[in-house]
Amino acid sequence: MITAFIIGCEVAFWVFVLAGLTFRYILKQPRIGAVLLYSTPVVDLALIVATVLDLRAGTPANFAHSLSAIYIGASIAFGHSMINWADVRFAHRFAGGPKPAPKPKNGAAHARNERIGWLKHLLAYIIGAAVLYGMILFVDDAARTASLSNTIRYWAIILGIDFLISFSYTLWPKTAKEPQNKPL
């Protein structure tokens, strides 16, 4: 049940984003578009409520409950940049806006971009782990919340690996590939 709700929340997030951008750029209704875009946190609130109600009903915590916390952390940490990414592309496609700048592929700009991505991942982890700890405290039964505790540990390992990869570009920046001359 909660898994389907999480999927529904992800779909609802993008429906709000696409509807907001459609109203903003295609239907020329920027106020309605802004209201729809600013409504995306309502999806997160609905997910928190559904997860807590499911746990309160006595359902043993499982990975789906963990996934809801991960979703909330990622949505808060990355949501603004995801909406901004879509906004720039929508503006370019439907409103004559400037062409989106490509992501840096090498050098110091790429390294900086990777570090910023990791910092957003860290923020998502802090928020998600706080939600997970809140669920653990709420249920107050270690046997029923072992899955939530495991998620925090596994996510910390993933965050550490992401740190090593992201910050490695600071020490060893990617270099531009030289064009290869092909023989005729």
Image (cartoon, rainbow, N blue to C red):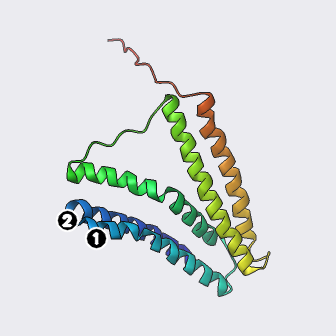
Location of residue 16 in the rendering, given as x and y in whole percent from the top left corner: 36, 68
Label annotation for residue 32: 1
- Along the horizontal axis of the image, is 69 left or right of 151? left
Q: Earlier in the sequence, mark 1 or mark 2?
A: 2
Residue on which disc 2 sits: 27
Q: Is residue 59 above or below residue 34?
A: below
- Along the horizontal axis of the image, is 68 left or right of 81? right
Q: Considering the numbered disc 2 on the image, is that residue within a helix, a strand or a loop? A: loop
What amino acid type is highlighted by mark number 1? Ile
Location of residue 182 in the rendering, given as x and y in whole percent from the top left corner: 37, 15
Residue 136 visible in the snapshot: yes
What amino acid type is highlighted by mark number 2? Leu
Q: Quadrant of the N terminus?
A: bottom right
Residue located at (62% from left, 72% from top)? 65
Q: Quadrant of the C terminus?
A: top left
- Along the horizontal axis of the image, is 160 left or right of 49? right
Along the line of sight, the residue nearer the viewer: 178 or 118: 118
Residue located at (58% from left, 33% from top)? 169
Q: Quadrant of residue 148?
A: bottom right
What is the spatial separation of the Cα atoms under label 1 and label 2, in whole angstroms? 10 Å
Q: Is residue 117 above or below residue 180?
A: below
